[in-house]
Image (cartoon, rainbow, N blue to C red):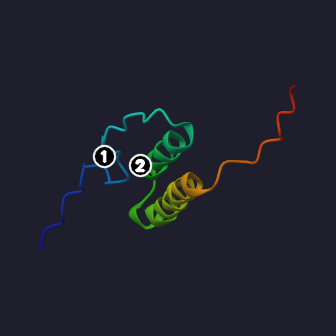
């Protein structure tokens, strides 16, 4: 019986995918896209929380687009 040689390769861990995130010009959307980078350093089972958080933030931003504009006080100038 022979002994197995120890492995010299480091254990595979979380690694960034290297997906480019281009700015949209909308701060609330860009913040959500930047949040995706948090998943790069988590094991796969930690990705769900980040993805759900980003999905919620993007959904809220889209919902806000359908909201009526905030009411403005009347401009009473003569």
**Direction left: furthest residue:** 1
What residue appears at the point 30 percent right and 42 percent down from the top-left corner?
A: 19
Q: Quadrant of the N terminus?
A: bottom left
Across and down, in percent, residue 23 comes to: 42, 33
* Left or right for 11, reference 64: left
Q: Position of residue 40 (x, y in %)?
A: 41, 49
Q: Residue at x 45, y 55 (%)?
A: 42
Q: Quadrant of the C terminus?
A: top right
For residue 44, above or below residue 78: below
Residue 31 lies in quadrant = top right
Q: At which x and y percent is residue 32?
A: 51, 47
Measure how far apart labels 2 and 1 are at the Cα level: 7 Å
- Ranked by sequence position, the earlier of labels 2 and 1 is 1
The answer to which of 41 and 68 lies nearer the viewer is 68
Q: Looking at the rendered structure, which numbered label has been put on residue 17?
A: 1
**Residue 74 badge:** none
Residue depicted at 30% across the width and 46% down the height: 17
Residue where numbered disc 2 is placed: 40
Q: Nearer the viewer, residue 1 or 14?
A: 14
Left or right relative to 34: residue 16 = left
- Number of residue marks: 2
Residues tagged 2 and 1 counted as in contact (Cβ below 8 A):
yes
Dot 1: what SS? loop
Characterize the local packing of mark 1: few (<14), some (14-19) or many (20 or more) Cα atoms within 10 angstroms. few
């Amino acid at each position: 019986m022979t002994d197995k040689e120890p492995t010299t390769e480091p254990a595979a861990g979380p690694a960034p995918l290297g997906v480019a995130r281009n700015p949209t010009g909308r701060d609330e959307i860009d913040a959500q896209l930047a949040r995706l980078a948090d998943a790069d350093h988590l094991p796969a089972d930690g990705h769900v929380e980040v993805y759900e958080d980003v999905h919620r933030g993007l959904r809220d931003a889209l919902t806000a687009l359908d909201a009526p504009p905030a009411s403005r006080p009347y401009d009473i100038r003569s």
